[in-house]
Structure formats: C-alpha cells, structure tokens
Image (tube, grey):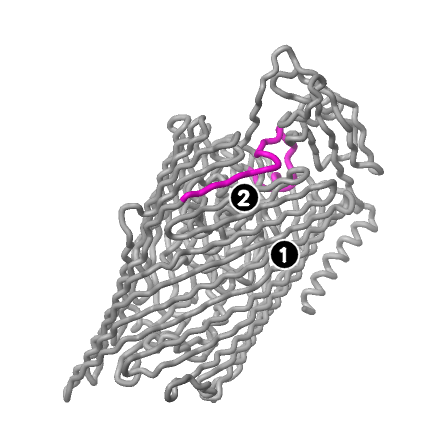
C-alpha cells in the first residue's frame, strides 16, 4: 500500500503543477435535447434523424435518432453556436437554429419542434444500423456477440468457441492460440468468481448478457502483466437510450435453459442499468473408462474402471450500474455484480486391479460412489471517478474495486472394499481490493501520454475439515484436516506513449513495472513439516506496436509483448490434496512465474463488406509450469501424485487466419484457423519425466455460414474442430462441435424467436486422453452428452437499435488507427479499466 500512495502522490503532484502553470482547467461539455412533433397529426416522430452542425458548417459533428416518443438527446456538445438538421423519410429537411450553449449553461432543451410532412409521407419507417460481427483495432479484435444468431440460449463458453483466436476445450478451459494462461475480465475488471473457477463461471454467464468480447493478444503496458496468452474482456449489455428501455430473452432446451432481463433508465445526467440472468442445466449423465499400468522393480499393477456420473448445474449472475454526471467536469460510475452458481455430481465407478509380483499375484474389485457439491457466492463492487481537464482528451480516472467470493466444496466417497470411506468439507473465502489511477494527456496531434499506478491486495483463506468413517458414522479427523492462508500484494506503475506520425504510421510504446509479494501459511496437525513460505519478485514489462496504414482498407502491424503467468495459490499450497485418493496432488511453494515474450506480424484488409486478417507469430516461454505425475502406492493399490514444477522452456511458431466474406448480399462465410507448434525443451532436472519431446503441430478451426433474408429470417451453420493438446507427459482429447440455428424477427423487429441445435446426429461425444511417464501409463475415454435442441426468444422494449449520423472522432478513436470491420456499421466498443 505504501508504494501505491507514493504513485498517487506523484500523479497528483504532476496534475497540480499543470494547473498552477495555467495548463489545467476543464472543458465543459453538455447536451442538446428536444422532441419532434408532426405538425398535422400532433403525434411524435419516432426514429427521425437529428444532425448537429456548427453554424455555417457543412458536415455533421454528431447526431441522434428520436425514440418512440419523439425525444432526442445529443451528448458531449462543447459550448458554441449550432444548427439542428432534422431528416425523416417523407418529410422535407428542416433546420433549427442557431442554438447557443455556454460554459455557464452547457445543456440546452429546445422543447417541442414541429415538423411539417411533405406531399408523400410514408406510413412506416425503419431506420436501423448494424455493427460488424468482427472488428479489428490497433490493440485488439472485437467480436460483437449480440449479433451472433446461434449464441442465444447458450453460455459464454458457447460464444467464445466462435471468437477469432480463442478455443474452449471439453472442461471449459479457455485458450488464446492454444495457450490457456488467459486473463479474463468482465467489463474491463477482474472478478473473484473467475479467479475461483473460470471454466464454471463461463458456463453460467448467459450469452444473452454479452454485448462484445475483446481479444487482446499483445496488450500494451496499461494492462496488468498477468496472462501469457493475452486478455479476454467480456463486455455486457447496457443501454444509452433516454427514458426507460430494456429487453428480455432466454431459451429452453434439452441440455440447458437460461433467461436474461435488461432494464435501463436514463434521465438527464443520471443513468441506471440493471441486468439479471440465470442458467439451469438438466441432469447430464456422462460415461467414462479408465486404464492404468504401473511397472516397477517389485511387480506390475494393472487397473481399470468404468462408471457414470450425473451432473446438475444452476447459476445466477446479476448486476446494477449507476452513473451520474455532476457537471461537465466530473462524473462517477458504480457497478455491483452478484454471482452465484452451484453444481452437484453423483458418480459411480466399478474398479478392478490386478497385481503380479515375483512371489505372488492378487486381484481387487470394488465399487465407489462419490457425492460432490460445489458452490460459489460472491460479488464485485467497483467505483470509478472521472475528472476532465480543459485540454481536449485530458482526464484522470480514479478507480476502486472490492471482489468477494465464498467457495464451498463438499464431497463424500463410499467404497465397498479396500479403501476407507471419507468425507471433506472445504470452505474458502477470497477478498481482493484494488486501487487504481489512470491519467491521459494528449500533448499534441502527434503524441498522447498515458500513465498510471495500481495496487492489488488479495487475501484468501481455506479450511478443509476431513471426517473418517468409524463404525457407522463419519467422525472429524483433525490430523487429516488443514487450513491455508494466502496473501498476495501487487504494486504496478506504467507509462504508454501513442505516436500518430506522418504517412499513416502510428506507434504504441510503453513500459510497466510490477512488484509482487506473496505469503502462504499452510497448517495441519497431521503434517508438522508444513512451513510458512514467502516470495518477493519484480518484473519489467515492455510493449511495442508499430502500425502502417498501407491504404484506406489495408493495415500492417508489428507488435511485441512480454507477459507473465503467476502460479495460483492452489499450485503453491504444499499440502497433499486427497480428494481423489488414487490421483493425489501437491502444491509447490518454490514455483516462479512463467515469462512469455511474443512477436507478431499482422495484416488486415477490408474489401467492401469482407474482412481478411492474417498473422504470423513467435512465442518463447521460460519457466513453464508443468504438472508432473509420479506413481505411488495407496494400500494395496497403485495411484499417482502430481506436483507442479518450472520444468521447461517452450518455443511456438504460429499462424492465424480469419476472414468474413459476403459472396452474395444475403450470405456471409466466416473462417478462423489457428495453427501452432508445441516444442518443449526440458530442464535437466526434469528431462526423465518428459515423454513428449518432439515438435507437435496443433490447430483450432472454426467455420460458419449464415443467410440473412430481408424478411427478418436468419439461418446459420457452424463447425468447430480442435486438435489434441499435448503436454510433457501425454495429450488431452481433440474436440469438435457442429451446430445449426434459425431465427425470425417478429413484432416489427422488436422480438425474435429461434431454434438452435448442437450435435444433432450423435447423443454422445467421445474424448480420449493419454499420459505416459517412467513407471506408469494411463489412458481414458470420456463420453459427454452433447446433443441439444433448444428454442430461443427475445423481446426489446423502449427503443430499437439505431445508428447515429457521422460523428466527430472521440479520444478513444484517435488511438485506434486503421480500425476495420465486417459488414459496415459504426460505433466503438466499451473498454473498462485494466
């Protein structure tokens, strides 16, 4: 904390000095509002276009579309003299003005404006606008999920399958270009729920809540250094419509059901958005087989099992965001998000073991029944204050966030023979506190400076209460129980320079310094050798992006980034976890963070309504954290103990290609292909544990075709294919999905109904895994019920989607040189604090 206060003092001293020398002050921006009325019918004109022009100007500076009550509002208007130009089909253009706004009175309500119809007035006018499905920016790729037909009725995991450069495996683990060390943000901020169990959280977020997904493969220094693969930022839906508006959506299917409600209220300088959603899956029965062979100097043990597991899952995620502009200088925004999910598993397995030694042989058979209940309840609360200065684009943002999560994992195992029944109730809490300051200064047209500081304080505590079966009941066993306290403090400071140079060159260069301090305190009455541990390390994170706008539709970009992946608190805990008695895990407090460096060359071209984007990249990772399994004996049976180590370095060359093409007006074809290598070089201490030392080629492929008819009927077919993912001791399964959806807009495009299906031709998908290490070999097959058919619906009220007239570039636009989209449309994407 002391370091963070120093950073704050430096920033505020700089700002105060600027103000004392006359550079400070504030630019007032206000709004112009009013209502359009038909002069004959006296009815409001809905969806009319209102353009804002300077007096004597020929190009619109901004604009708006009237809502169903004829109201319009144009924000971010600087003091000056303006004309309003009203355009509506069937009506002659009308100019109203001059309208004067001043520093003292930045807001102007022009009242009711009467508009006379022309000789021919159309009975109904629909003015709609659409964003591109995929947008390419200087620092990220944006996927507009709200335009995704087959996403409705699904979850965030389903949407991520279709995002360029992103893949999701069977367990819900997310990867960017094959690397699962991904930092996931929600509205630009971390969440305690994702820190506890990212894959489970993504399965619980209804797709209908998601507006866009941003993929940042080469983050600038303003972003946290965590996540060697990059950053995924999930932006949820919000509305800027005056008055009250909202939407309701959902889906019912054979695999899962969900619902979502959005409400927005905007009045003068106050806005409020409320979102509530839930997800419920029907009980799903999975099948599994497992085979192991252990060899050693005392004999050979062969083990096999087959079983079924039934999983039930439900979740809710709700949020409320309130914003208020005190004046043109200052505004404040606060968001509260509530997360809750739980799932239960009931698994039954039949187990067989055969051991052969030089002296004897014996066999063992038993049946196990495992009951597992997992739940997470938590919240994220954030507060952001923005102060704008006189210089256009100069501002400071002060942010704070408190994330809390309570995690409970309870399991009970019953065995008919060999192993004792056991029970464990694990309760954990996670509190994370963040303070942050970000300052932006456009020095001139060629240079913009960004600087900031951040302090993150994490406090985690877990208690494992183990009970052993004695007689006919479970009795608490203090020697087998444990507690674990973990503290992590991260102090960071950064500077980013954006250069806009002649001849369409632009440079984004920055540096970030982070200091990390961790402290762990494991304790167990039965393991007296557990000792507290601590670590303190620093890292400098440079970033560089050079971009050349070759033509108005072609961009070439070269970028370099350095990232780290800190070991999680679970990987550092030295206590042996025996949740699976035959597959135990042990943490390693000596782990260091992985460090990755990536160089990428990207080419992007935009041809009419089609986009082609191609990248080649090289990534070098040192200190790769690998899970190494070793054989152990558990009574008369054989098992494994897995421990993590910084075991190797990895070099990966890759190629990524995605495109969206419209061969004909109604048809859109999309493809995303990522091919990359896995080439580990083990450190000497772990070379004997490696069985995959040759270069492996891995890939992720996505393809889709959609038809969009003028009648409001939309159809889409998509497919996903992921290759096996290799590790140092084996491979995880390949993964493929086939899906189809159809949707029809109804109620004057305010609503829609649809039908989605996933894997219609097979009930189960089968996944094979393989692991090999000195002393043992194991293989498994897992069958998951993937076939699903669902009905989706949505209804919007208050106001339909519209596009504004051409607007003056905002400060955010100035740093996104060469942004390209697919399918036309306008509008930026939201991005919160890093």
Residue 490 locus on image (x, y percent): 60, 66
Residue 113 image-quadrant placement: top right
Figure quadrant of the N terminus: bottom right
Nearer to us in this view, 150 or 519? 150
> Is 415 displayed left or right of 73 in the figure?
left
Residues rendered magenta in the picture: 791-817
Q: Is residue 567 left or right of residue 688?
A: right
Instruction: Please state the total of marks drawn on the protein image.
Output: 2
Residue 361 belongs to magenta span: no
Q: Quadrant of the C terminus?
A: bottom right
> Which label was assigned to residue 336?
1
Give the residue at the far top of this rendering: 119
- Element carrying mark 2: strand
Alpha carbon distance from label 1 to label 2 = 20 Å
In this view, 739 is above or below 468: above
1 or 2: tag closer to the N-terminus:
2
Question: Residue at coordinates 41% horizontally, 45% vertically from top-left?
Answer: 162
């Amino acid at each position: 904390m002391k370091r963070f206060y120093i950073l704050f003092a430096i920033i505020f001293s700089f700002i105060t000095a600027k103000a004392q020398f006359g550079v400070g002050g504030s630019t007032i921006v206000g709004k112009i509002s009013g209502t359009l009325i038909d002069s004959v019918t006296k009815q409001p004109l809905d969806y009319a276009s209102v353009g804002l022009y300077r007096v004597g100007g020929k190009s619109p500076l901004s604009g708006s579309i009237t809502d169903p009550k004829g109201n319009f509002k144009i924000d971010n208007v600087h003091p000056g003299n303006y004309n309003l130009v009203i355009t509506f089909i069937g009506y002659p253009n009308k100019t109203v003005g001059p309208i004067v706004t001043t520093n003292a009175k930045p807001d102007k309500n022009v009242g009711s404006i009467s508009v006379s119809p022309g000789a021919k007035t159309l009975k109904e006018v629909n003015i709609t606008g659409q964003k591109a499905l995929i947008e390419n920016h200087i620092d990220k790729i944006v996927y507009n999920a709200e335009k995704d037909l087959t996403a409705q009725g699904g979850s965030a995991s389903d949407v991520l399958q279709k995002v360029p450069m992103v893949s999701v495996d069977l367990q819900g683990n997310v990867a960017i270009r094959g690397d699962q060390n991904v930092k996931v943000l929600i509205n630009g901020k971390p969440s305690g729920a994702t820190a506890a169990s990212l894959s489970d959280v993504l399965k619980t977020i209804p797709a209908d809540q998601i507006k866009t997904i941003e993929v940042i493969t080469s983050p600038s220094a303003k972003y946290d250094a965590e996540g060697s693969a990059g950053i995924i930022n999930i932006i949820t839906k919000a509305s800027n419509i005056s008055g009250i508006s909202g939407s309701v959506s959902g889906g019912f299917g054979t695999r899962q059901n969900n619902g979502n409600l959005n409400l927005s209220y905007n009045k003068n300088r106050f806005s409020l958005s409320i979102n509530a959603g839930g997800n419920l899956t029907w009980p799903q029965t999975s099948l599994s087989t497992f085979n192991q062979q252990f060899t050693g100097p005392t004999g050979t043990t062969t083990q096999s099992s087959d079983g079924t597991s039934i999983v039930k899952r439900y979740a809710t995620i709700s949020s409320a965001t309130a914003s208020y502009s005190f004046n043109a200088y200052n505004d404040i925004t606060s968001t509260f998000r509530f997360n809750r999910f739980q799932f239960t598993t009931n698994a039954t397995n039949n187990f067989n073991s055969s051991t052969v030694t030089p002296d004897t042989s014996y066999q063992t058979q038993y049946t196990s029944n495992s009951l597992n209940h997992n739940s997470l309840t938590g919240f994220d609360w954030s507060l952001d204050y923005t102060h704008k200065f006189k210089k256009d684009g100069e501002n400071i943002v002060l942010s704070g966030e408190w994330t809390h999560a309570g995690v409970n994992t309870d399991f009970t195992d019953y065995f008919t023979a060999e192993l004792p029944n056991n029970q464990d109730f694990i309760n954990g809490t996670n509190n994370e506190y963040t303070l942050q300051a970000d300052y932006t200064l456009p020095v001139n047209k060629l240079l913009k400076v960004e600087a900031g500081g951040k302090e993150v304080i994490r406090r985690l505590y877990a208690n494992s209460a183990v009970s052993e079966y004695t007689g006919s009941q479970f009795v608490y066993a203090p020697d087998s129980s444990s507690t674990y306290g973990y503290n992590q403090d991260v102090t960071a400071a950064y500077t980013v320079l954006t250069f806009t140079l002649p001849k369409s060159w632009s440079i984004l260069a920055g540096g970030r310094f982070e200091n990390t301090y961790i402290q762990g305190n494991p304790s167990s009455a039965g393991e007296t050798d557990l000792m507290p541990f601590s670590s303190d390390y620093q890292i400098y994170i440079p970033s560089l992006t050079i971009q050349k706008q070759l033509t108005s539709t072609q961009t070439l970009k070269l970028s370099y980034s350095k990232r780290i992946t800190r070991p999680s608190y679970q990987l550092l805990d030295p206590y042996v976890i025996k949740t699976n008695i035959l597959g135990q895990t042990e943490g390693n407090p000596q782990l260091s963070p992985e460090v990755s460096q990536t160089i990428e060359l990207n080419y992007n071209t935009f041809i009419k309504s089609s986009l082609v984007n191609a990248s080649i990249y090289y990534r070098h990772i040192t200190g790769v954290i690998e899970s190494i399994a070793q054989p152990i004996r558990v009574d008369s049976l054989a098992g494994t103990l897995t421990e993590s180590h910084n075991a190797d370095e990895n070099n990966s060359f890759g190629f990524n290609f995605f495109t969206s093409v419209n061969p004909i007006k109604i048809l859109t074809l999309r493809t995303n292909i990522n091919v990359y290598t896995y080439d580990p070089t083990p450190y000497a201490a772990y070379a004997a544990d490696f069985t995959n030392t040759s270069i492996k080629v891995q890939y992720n492929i996505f393809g889709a075709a959609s038809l969009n008819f003028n009648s409001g009927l939309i159809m889409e077919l998509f497919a996903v294919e992921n290759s096996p993912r290799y590790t140092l001791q084996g491979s995880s399964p390949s993964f493929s999905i086939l899906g189809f959806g159809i949707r029809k807009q109804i109620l004057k495009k305010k609503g829609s109904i649809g039908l989605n299906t996933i894997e219609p031709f097979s009930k189960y998908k089968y996944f094979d895994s393989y692991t090999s290490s000195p002393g043992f070999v194991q293989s498994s097959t897992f069958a998951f019920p993937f076939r699903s058919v669902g009905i989706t619906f949505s209804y919007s009220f208050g106001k339909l989607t519209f596009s504004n007239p051409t607007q003056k570039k905002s400060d955010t636009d100035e740093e996104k040189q060469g942004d390209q989209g697919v399918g036309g449309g306008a509008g930026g994407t939201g991005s919160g604090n890093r």
